[in-house]
Image (spheres, rainbow, N blue to C red):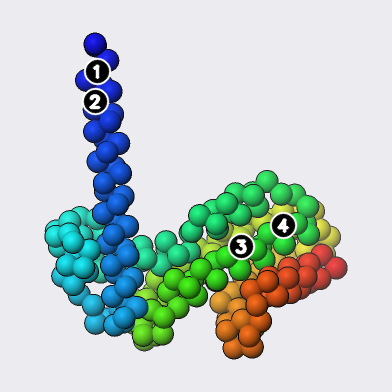
């Protein structure tokens, strides 16, 4: 009997957290729908709140601003569950070729998801300074997240060691970037499988030969 109030409080806290997560996802879904249909700059906070079925103060409490919502939409695309799964596997790998194959997989997952989730939104918001700033920030995050893999390559691979850590990081970042994916997959019609296979083999030849 003594434990019942504690259990009840834990249950209430868990239920509130679940409801808050549901509200957050509903807002992001509504924002993505509006951004895709009309472009980032033409959508207002009030419209997002109306479509999501929440009050504007609730939206501000969760995200502070429209830029905060946009950032959360883009981050949800970037850090999707498949990415998290592969990135966690990458942390345990020591074989250089496997590190680079996983790096190619991570790039494919990020860019495939980005194309499917925010590709149309980017088309209507290509000149949006808010979207540009967020994407630049996430590019910096992507560069940072590759550091540990680059360090392992320099440690275990003589060719990478000769290049030096800075060059290895630059090469990884360049080959796995959006521009290469865009040219091969979106413009030349490569499949995602073909892109991933080519990217893995190119990284292996470049950094381990």
Cα distance in 3D space between marks 2 and 1: 6 Å
Cα distance in 3D space between marks 3 and 1: 46 Å
Cα distance in 3D space between marks 3 and 2: 42 Å
Q: Which of marks 4 and 2 is in front?
A: 2
Q: Please indicate, yes or no, whether residue 68 appears anywhere in the rendered image.
A: no
**In the image shown, does 149 or 8 lie closer to the viewer?**
8
Q: Which mark is residue 99?
A: 4
The residue carrying mark 3 is: 106
What secondary structure is found at the residue carrying circle 1?
Answer: helix
Q: Which mark is first along the chain, 4 or 1?
A: 1
Cα distance in 3D space between marks 4 and 2: 47 Å
What secondary structure is found at the residue carrying circle 2?
Answer: helix
**Residue located 55% across and 71% down the image:** 112
Q: Nearer the viewer, mark 3 or mark 1?
A: 1
Coordinates of residue 165 in the picture (x, y in percent)? 69, 62
Mark 2–mark 1 contact, CB under 8 Å?
yes
Q: Which mark is first along the chain, 1 or 3?
A: 1
Cα distance in 3D space between marks 3 and 4: 10 Å
Q: In this view, does 188 lie to the left or right of 27?
A: right
What is the number of callouts on the image?
4
Q: Where, by quadrant of the figure, is residue 176 drawn?
A: bottom right
Cα distance in 3D space between marks 1 and 4: 50 Å
**Residue located 78% across and 70% down the image:** 201
What secondary structure is found at the residue carrying circle 4?
Answer: helix
Q: Nearer the viewer, mark 3 or mark 2?
A: 2
Mark 3–mark 2 contact, CB under 8 Å?
no
Coordinates of residue 190 in the picture (x, y in percent)? 66, 81
Q: Which mark is residue 8?
A: 2
Mark 4–mark 2 contact, CB under 8 Å?
no
The residue carrying mark 1 is: 4
Coordinates of residue 66 in the picture (x, y in percent)? 25, 69
């Amino acid at each position: 009997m003594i434990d019942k109030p504690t259990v009840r409080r834990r249950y209430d806290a868990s239920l509130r957290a679940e409801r808050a997560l549901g509200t957050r996802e509903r807002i992001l879904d509504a924002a993505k729908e509006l951004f895709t249909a009309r472009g980032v700059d033409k959508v207002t906070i009030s419209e997002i709140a109306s479509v999501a079925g929440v009050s504007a103060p609730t939206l501000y409490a969760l995200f502070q601003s429209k830029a905060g919502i946009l950032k959360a939409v883009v981050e949800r695309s970037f850090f999707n569950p498949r990415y998290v799964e592969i990135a966690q596997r990458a942390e345990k790998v020591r074989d250089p070729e496997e590190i680079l194959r996983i790096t190619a997989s991570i790039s494919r997952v990020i860019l495939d998801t980005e194309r499917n989730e925010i590709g149309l939104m980017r088309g209507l918001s290509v000149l949006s300074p808010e979207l540009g700033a967020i994407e630049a920030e996430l590019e910096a995050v992507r560069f940072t997240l590759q550091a540990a893999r680059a360090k392992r390559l320099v440690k275990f691979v003589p060719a990478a060691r000769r290049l030096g850590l800075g060059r290895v990081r630059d090469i990884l970042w360049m080959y796995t970037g959006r521009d290469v994916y865009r040219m091969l997959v979106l413009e030349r019609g490569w499949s995602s499988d073909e892109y991933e296979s080519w990217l893995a083999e190119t990284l292996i030849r470049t950094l381990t030969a």
